Amino acid sequence: MRKRLFSLLAAALVAAGGLTAATAVTTPAPANAASCYEWSSTLSRGDSGSAVKELQIRVAGWVSSAEHLVIDGKYGPATEAAVTRFQSGYGLAVDGVAGPQTFGKIYDLTSSDCTPIHFSYSEFDDNCGANNFNGGAVSASTAKENTRRVMWQLEAMRHKLGDRPVGITSGFRSYSCNSAVGGSPSSRHLYGETADLGISVNVHSQCTLYRAAWKAGFTEILGPGYSGHNDHVHVANDPSPFRSAPSC
Ligand SMILES: [Zn+2]
């Protein structure tokens, strides 16, 4: 983490040094993510397309309790509300319109591999020691993309919980790995749509994590009191919503 922080700072310094005064004022320079997605125009309600979809992925953790933001490339009321919460959460001007300030904050939150700064693929691809996204229910590239979406939701959750670390104990699993660890045969771990937040690597209580996941857009949340989940909270983007933590 320290090494990564250093590389981010180095990248920021390089980028800052290369800016002219004019562009520094008018352009929300993606200092940390020069090769990642960049928006070319302001987006607001009624807009649609891939630019909106990329925005939705990054604000999907800013929904209301038990809501799940559909990543459909359509800037409707739900997307507008999520952008509004994102702006409020980071102390930006609040108008529900994604412009230079909002994009600039997203760039600030993006690391060089285009994932949010506080999470990385290596936390999710252990896969029983294989260190890849192969062998699951979807292609490796799809599993990786699904994981990136989970990371943005976790980034929001982390910020709302006071910017304290959120630890991951299991992410993507191949069929053989999932079977070996006793996972459900239809587990969302096979899709990379999941994170297990183990109590051994988290400062927050299980119930705090469970409740925070409700407001981060996850549809499947399992915690203490639910069979097999007394040592972690499982969060996922399951098409069939299900939440249970009888002990919370
Ligand atoms: Zn799990």
Image (cartoon, rainbow, N blue to C red):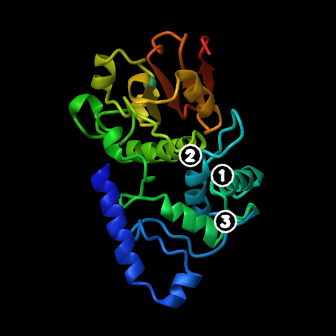
- Separation (CA) of disc 3 from disc 1: 14 Å
Q: Quadrant of the C terminus?
A: top right
Residue 179 against residue 44 in the figure, above or below: above
Q: Secondary structure at mark 2?
A: helix
Q: Which mark is residue 98?
A: 3
Residue at position x 59%, y 59% in the image: 55
Mark 2–mark 1 CB contact (< 8 Å): yes
Q: Please report whichever mark, 3 or 2, sits nearer to the chain's N-terminal start.
A: 3
Residue found farthest to the left: 130
Q: Which mark is residue 89?
A: 1
* Nearer to the camera, 47 or 37: 37
- Separation (CA) of disc 2 from disc 1: 8 Å
> Does any atom of ligand 1 lie closer than 8 Å to the CB of label 1?
no
- Separation (CA) of disc 3 from disc 2: 19 Å
Q: Quadrant of residue 63?
A: top right
Instruction: Rate crowding at label 1 as few (under 14), some (14 to 19) or many (20 or more) other CA atoms within 10 Å.
Output: some
Residue at position x 55%, y 70% in the image: 39
Residue 24 against residue 79 in the figure, above or below: below
The amino acid type of the residue labelled 3 equals Ala
The amino acid type of the residue labelled 2 equals His
Q: Which mark is residue 159?
A: 2
Q: Secondary structure at mark 1?
A: helix
Q: Please report whichever mark, 3 or 1, sits nearer to the chain's N-terminal start.
A: 1
Residue at position x 61%, y 11% in the image: 246
Q: Secondary structure at mark 3?
A: loop
> Does any atom of ligand 1 lie closer than 8 Å to the CB of label 3?
no
Residue 135 against residue 39 in the figure, above or below: above
Question: Which circle, 3 or 2, is nearer the viewer?
Answer: 2
Mark 3–mark 1 CB contact (< 8 Å): no
Question: Which circle, 3 or 1, is nearer the viewer?
Answer: 1
Mark 3–mark 2 CB contact (< 8 Å): no
The amino acid type of the residue labelled 1 equals Gly
